[in-house]
Amino acid sequence: MPDIEKYNGIDMADIEKISGVDVATSGGGGGTATGTPTGSVAFGFGQGKIVISNHSSYTNPNYSVSVSIGGVTIVGDADVNHVMDTGDDSLGSVMTFSDSIAGTAERTVTIKAQEFGDKTQSAALTLTYTPTFVAYRYIRVTNVNESKTTSGTSWLMLKNWSLYEGAGQTGTNHPTTNLTSNTSQTGIALTSSTVYSNNYKYKAFDSSSSTRFWAISGTPKYLQIEFEPGTYSTPPTIRSMNLNVGYAYWLLFEGSNDGVNYTDMTHIGPMSPTNNNAGNSNLNIG
């Protein structure tokens, strides 16, 4: 949009207000610019999470986000999930996005802020990340909250969890067969926090729409798959997943090679903004 130099024949620089609204002292009447955002980006397993650290300094801000490789946009703002504040009446400090582009080229994330009212868009915050994939012997999913703790979380209900060696739910799928018991596939071991009634662990991996794994007690509530060394001398590298979520708040996926020390793979949510009821949400991750 072109800059406005005059209003009713008067230079904009000589006008203080139009209809009671402040006019910028330079730049053609756009108002003062919103301050530049500060923040961080975390990326794992095809999912990115942006946290704006100076969010509280803004009044009802909007954020625009893009992700690019070598100047070519791969994620536009329309594809970014802008998480709402607790009251659901304004945008919060968290944004999430998916990036399933193959390769490990460095990505550039560009973020601009704009406050409600007469301020113009801010200068850009630029962040970078590089996708990496690691072969983990243990992969665990836990019901957590936005800060990755268990406060405010409830049940964990999952079904049809598939782990793929290729991006975009392609390549070899693990487990390689539909499980009919917790030990029905050699080399696959399942553990969980607890199990409610007959909603056994293997029912998260049986490809049935009518069965599920369900934990309602214990803290934290989790389900874990292990690729046992007797069958998998090297565990498969998992690049994408699919699963159906009945109950969870946020999901934290972690990987480990010793079953003791875990590394964050990705943190996704909220599945439900208020009561952990995800309503059988189907997730493609990576």
Image (cartoon, helix red, strand yellow):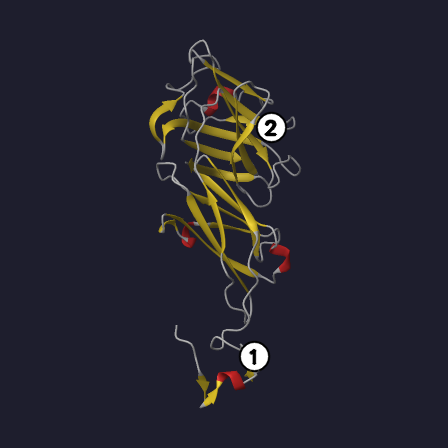
Q: Position of residue 218 (x, y in %)?
A: 65, 26
Which mark, residue 4?
A: none
Q: Check the image and name the residue furthest to the bottom.
A: 9
Residue 168 in the image, given as x and y percentages of width and height = 36, 35
* Amino acid found under the numbered disc labelled 2: Lys
215 vs 283, nearest the viewer: 283
Q: Quadrant of the N terminus?
A: bottom left
* Amino acid at dot 1: Val
Q: Can you give x and y, in whole percent of width and height, for residue 48 in the image?
A: 48, 42
Picture residue at 55% right of the left edge, 43% below the top:
272
Which image quadrant for residue 217? Answer: top right
Look at the picture and state if 42 lies above or below 113. above
Q: Position of residue 188 (x, y in %)?
A: 45, 15
| Other-residue count near label 1 (Cα within 10 Å), few / some / many at <14 / 14–19 / ≥20 | few
From where the camera sits, is residue 112 visible? yes
* Residue 51 seen: no
Query: Any mark on residue 221, and which?
Result: 2
C-alpha separation, residue under disc 2 versus residue under disc 1: 53 Å
The relative height of residue 70 versus residue 238 in the rendered view (above or below) is: below
Q: Are marks 2 and 1 in contact (CB under 8 Å)?
A: no
List the residue tagged with mark 1: 21
* Helix, strand or loop for disc 2: loop
